Amino acid sequence: MARFENEEEIPIMVDGAQWFVGVDWATQSHCV
């Protein structure tokens, strides 16, 4: 499930909803 460069910062040990939230959070954090 390594779809991001810094997957280590995203806890992918939850449901798909929370996973999607992590992706969105990471995207916004990098788009700053």
Image: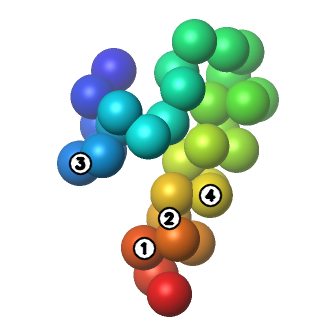
Q: Secondary structure at mark 4?
A: helix
Considering only order in the chain, which callout, 1 or 3, is on the residue closer to the N terminus? Answer: 3
Q: Residue at x 71, y 15 (%)?
A: 15
Q: Label 4 belongs to which residue?
A: 25
Q: Residues within 10 Å of mark 2 (few under 14, many from 20)?
A: few
- Residue 25 occupies which quadrant of the picture? bottom right
Residue 8 picture location, percent across and down: 35, 33
Q: Label 2 belongs to which residue?
A: 27
Q: Label 1 belongs to which residue?
A: 30
Marks 4 and 2: in contact by CB < 8 Å?
yes
The residues tagged by marks 1 and 4 sit, at their Cα atoms, a distance apart of 9 Å
Q: Nearer the viewer, residue 9 or 4?
A: 9
Marks 1 and 2: in contact by CB < 8 Å?
yes
Q: Residues within 10 Å of mark 4 (few under 14, many from 20)?
A: few
Marks 4 and 1: in contact by CB < 8 Å?
no
* Type of amino acid under label 4: Trp
- Residue 24 occupies which quadrant of the picture? bottom right
- Residue 28 occupies which quadrant of the picture? bottom right
Q: Residues within 10 Å of mark 3 (few under 14, many from 20)?
A: few
Residue 26 picture location, percent across and down: 51, 57
